[in-house]
Each structure stands twice: as C-alpha cells, then as structure tokens.
Amino acid sequence: MTSSGGARRPGRWGRIVLKLSGEAFAGGNGYGIDGELAAQIATEIVRVRSEFEIDVAIVVGGGNIWRGMAGEGVGMDRAQADYMGMLATVINALALQDTLERLGQPTRVQTAIGMAQVAEPYVRRRAIRHLEKGRVVIFAAGTGNPFFTTDTAAALRAVEIEAGALLKGTHSGTDGIYTADPRIDPEAEKLGEVRYLDVLSRGLRAMDNTAVSLCMDNELPIVVFDLMGPGNVRAILDGQSIGTLVS
Ligand code: UDP
C-alpha cells in the first residue's frame, strides 16, 4: 500500500490524514503565513515519511486568512464568505506544497473547487495513486461546499482514501481534549482517550460535530494533539499516547 524506499518501519497506521488548521501557518499575530512555521511542519512530515512506511495526506484550513463566519458577522452572505474561506485554504496548500518540495518531498495539491492552472481537481482514485507513489497529497478547498469546515473535509477525505486515522493538530497551546477549556478553567482535565459519543454529548472541544459524527459512523480514530510539540507526529505513529484519542 505504501511507497517503498529506505529502511522504513511500519507505524501505527499505514495511511493518515493530517489536519492542519490555517493558524498553524500563522505567526504570533494569527494572520498570514510564517515561512519558518511552515518549514517546521514540513520538516516533521518529511521526517515521519522517512522513518515509517506511511502514506501522508494533508487537509489544510484557512483560518489564518479568512473564515466564513467572520464575513457573516459583518453582514456578508454566508455562502459567499465560505467560498472565500475555501479559496484561502488553497493559498495555504500552495505554500505548504512549496515548502515540502524545497525539502525534496514530491507533492500534489488537489482542490475541491476547480482551478486547473494551480492544482489538480480532487479525484479520489488519483489521490490514492499519488500516495502509493510516495507523494504527499494536500487536499485544499475543504469539501467544496459552504457551511462545512475543513475538519469535516479532513474526516471525509480520510474515510474516502481509507486512512487508518485522522490526526488533528492543534496550535492554540492545548495538547488534546480537556473536560473544559484549560485556558479558562484551572480544574479542566485532559482526557487521554474518549469515545465519539462523549465528545458529542458533552460538547467537548475537539472538532465540529459533523466531523466527529462522520468519523464515528466510519470508525475512524481521531488523535487530537499539539502540532507544535516537536516530534509529536512521530511519537503518535510510534504508538505513544500523545494528545487525546477519540475512538
Ligand atoms: N469552508 C467551507 N467549506 C468547507 C471547508 C471550509 O465553506 O468544506 C470555509 C469556511 O468559511 C471556513 C473557511 O473555509 O471558515 C476556512 O476553513 P476552516 O475554518 O475550517 O479553517 P481552519 O479553522 O482549519 O483554519
């Protein structure tokens, strides 16, 4: 299933989807693309691919540039604002592609909204073929539909390409799912493992409900972890208990 090359060892899963929020690319002010942060993320991806027999697909968010809700908040048509958000994810995808390729990692960007001059359209079978050839596939433009999020896009793509898990990187200083927001509530406790239904019924902050439901219905494990923790993706693939496992 995975591409070959080098002395790589099996990881916890043979194929993953890594969800990167737009904010993961932003510097201190939360806006735009910080080249050093992008390089840090790309380096970790290249490193895990060199160590493990693993196919890596990535879904990128766009919150560092635009969020549909922000547009709606100032009176814009929600669907229009959401399309803007989807276009924002394409900017991040192209930045990440450039960063990965400068590190020697072949990549393909596939978009859910057609823009043939800059990226391939999303074609499931083609995405799988790219992964089998050792390319990192970056899925952009979310699901292609307004009123959804890139978390849901990540869940959807993960199910479609038969990934073993969805790794949801956070960057807000939290390193998993807590019983309450640890930045506000000092009593908040981190959960090592939690069931999908508990996430939904207790309103735990992990991913949006649509994304969690899709993973639940398809028995796709989610790992919520601190993306900025050095070596975290590697440690997760190594089988270590990092962040929170939702299953
Ligand atoms: N979006 C959308 N449909 C999708 C995915 C994303 O309409 O399937 C829009 C939505 O407006 C969202 C924006 O794109 O606010 C950026 O995505 P998201 O907020 O999920 O990015 P992240 O929080 O991961 O940076």
Image: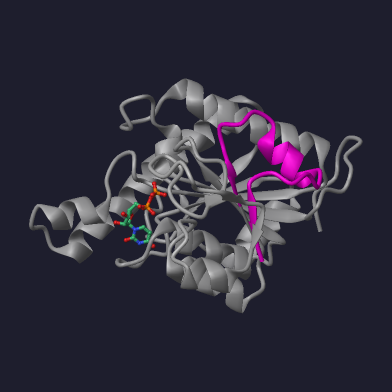
Q: Where does the image place residue 158, in percent across and percent down from the top left?
A: 60, 63
221 relative to 115 in the view: left or right? right
- Residue 29 vs 207, above or below: the answer is above
Task: Report the residue that reaches farthest toward the bottom.
Answer: 217
Q: Where does the image place residue 138, in percent across and percent down from the top left?
A: 54, 48
Residue positioned 55% across, 25% down in the render: 39
Q: Is residue 125 visible?
A: yes
Residue 73 magenta-drawn?
no
Q: Quadrant of residue 25?
A: top left
- Residue 46 vs 163, above or below: the answer is above
Quadrant (top left/top right/bottom left/bottom right) for the N terminus = bottom right
171 relative to 235 in the view: left or right? left
Q: Quadrant of ligand 1?
A: bottom left
Q: Where does the image place residue 46, in percent across and percent down from the top left?
A: 69, 33
- Residue 209 vs 165, above or below: the answer is below
Judging depth in this view, the residue of 66 and 135 nearest the camera is 66
Q: Quadrant of residue 247?
A: bottom right
Residue 235 magenta-drawn?
yes
Residue positioned 52% across, 51% down in the render: 178
Residue positioned 78% across, 44% down in the render: 240
Residue positioned 92% across, 36% down in the render: 7
The span picked out in magenta is 224-247
